[in-house]
Image (cartoon, rainbow, N blue to C red):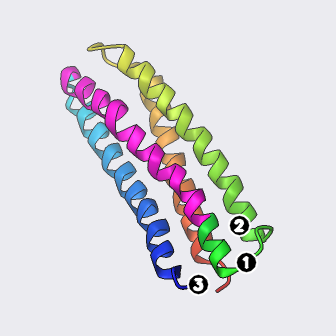
């Protein structure tokens, strides 16, 4: 229990960084697509796929580990309803993250050609669903019994 504050920080910081990073990248890619400069968009997509997505994956994969450590330190059983629901939402979040990474890779493979409208919309839908799920998980974890 003596490490409780440290574990809370180690668990909360990646969640906040993940949320802020996803919002920043969504805005960045949206602005690049709106500008219509295919070279700028291709460069931003390349940087996103090479650096940002692996960093986001590390942040996202650290959440279950630090969450388990946090719950274990407090002594809560892992079968609590809010924890099980959060785990299910997290699994769906990871699936959508993989789908988004695949769609971004397909978009990047087009090179300097503009992305088809359906591909851009699908990426946007995945990104919005990821943000909604991340916020729902954070709300669920914040509403847990004290």
- Distance between the alpha carbons at the discs numbered 3 and 2: 19 Å
Q: Is 61 colored magenta in this rendering?
A: yes
Q: Picture coordinates of residue 119 (x, y %)?
A: 46, 24
In the picture, measured across the screen, residue 51 lies left or right of residue 122, that is: left
Q: Tell me, yes or no, whether the two marked residues, 1 and 2, touch with CB atoms within 8 Å.
A: yes
Residue marked by disc 3: 1
Residue at coordinates 27% horizontally, 42% vertically from top-left? 28
Dot in front, 1 or 2 = 1
Ranked by sequence position, the earlier of labels 1 and 3 is 3
Secondary structure mostly taken by the magenta-highlighted segment of the chain: helix
- Distance between the alpha carbons at the discs numbered 1 and 2: 10 Å
Hey, which quadrant is residue 83 in on the image? bottom right
Q: Determine whether the residue tagged by mark 3 lies in a helix, strand or loop.
A: loop
Residue marked by disc 1: 76
Q: Determine whether the residue tagged by mark 2 lies in a helix, strand or loop.
A: helix
The magenta segment: 38-67
């Amino acid at each position: 229990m003596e490490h409780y504050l440290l574990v809370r920080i180690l668990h909360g910081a990646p969640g906040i960084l993940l949320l802020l990073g996803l919002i920043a990248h969504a805005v960045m890619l949206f602005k690049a697509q709106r500008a219509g400069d295919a070279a700028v968009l291709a460069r931003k997509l390349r940087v996103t796929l090479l650096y940002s997505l692996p960093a986001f994956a590390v942040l996202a994969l650290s959440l279950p580990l630090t969450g388990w450590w946090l719950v274990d330190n407090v002594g809560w059983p892992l079968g609590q309803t809010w924890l099980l629901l959060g785990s299910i939402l997290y699994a769906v979040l990871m699936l959508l993250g993989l789908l988004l990474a695949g769609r971004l890779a397909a978009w990047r493979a087009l090179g300097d050609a503009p992305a088809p409208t359906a591909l851009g919309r699908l990426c946007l839908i995945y990104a919005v669903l990821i943000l909604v799920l991340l916020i729902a998980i954070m709300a669920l974890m914040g509403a847990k019994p004290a």
